[in-house]
Amino acid sequence: MQVEGNAVFRVKALAELLDVSRSTVYRAIEAGQLEALKIGSGRGALRIPGFSVNIWLSDCMDAAAAEFFHGDASAEQADNPESETGDDVAESSLNAWLGASDEAEASPAAGDSAAAGVAGVA
């Protein structure tokens, strides 16, 4: 899936487009995996550029493929309706990838950027 590179999305619209929860989008932004623009002062408004969405989707597909082909998941699990579905495997891969990134950010080598992935625009 690709989105228009010059498009700009609200969190809710992106979550609906990708059929994920808004929390998933916010976690990716907080983890620095999905770039967002903060427009305005105070609380402001978050907007996600389309090119950032394409990069994030590509990274998610790579993580899901790595989990499927090199992890614990098997083709039988993905095809067996009584076990995790392919969607469940992909979502658990995404959550594992988000968790791994959170651990990397918690380490001292992660840098001193307090708002990784969010650029402010006044």
Image (cartoon, helix red, strand yellow):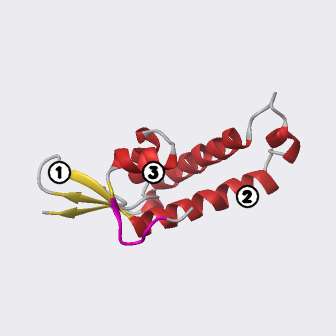
Instruction: Write the residue at 48% across / 54% down.
Output: 107
Among numbered discs 3 and 1, the one appearing first in the sequence: 3
The C terminus: image quadrant: bottom left
Characterize the magenta stretch by its predominant secondary structure.
loop
Distance between the alpha carbons at the discs numbered 3 and 1: 18 Å
Query: Relative to residue 108, is residue 12 depicted above or below?
Result: above
The picture places residue 41, in percent across and down from the top left corner, at 11, 54
- For disc 3, the marked residue is 28
The N terminus: image quadrant: bottom right
Among numbered discs 3 and 2, the one appearing first in the sequence: 3
Q: Secondary structure at mark 1?
A: loop
> In the shown orientation, is residue 79 left or right of residue 38?
right
Q: Quadrant of residue 38?
A: bottom left
Distance between the alpha carbons at the discs numbered 3 and 2: 19 Å
Instruction: Write the residue at 51% across / 43% down.
Output: 19
The picture places residue 18, in percent across and down from the top left corner, at 50, 49
Q: Which residues are magenta?
A: 3-8
Q: Is residue 122 magenta?
A: no
Say the numbered circle drawn on residue 61. none
Instruction: Write the residue at 58% across / 62% down.
Output: 59
Q: Amino acid at mark 1?
A: Gly
| Tag 3–tag 1 contact (CB < 8 Å) | no
The picture places residue 26, in percent across and down from the top left corner, at 39, 46
Query: Relative to residue 84, is residue 24 depicted above or below?
Result: below
Say the numbered circle drawn on residue 44. 1
Q: Is residue 4 magenta?
A: yes
> In the shown orientation, is residue 4 left or right of residue 90?
left
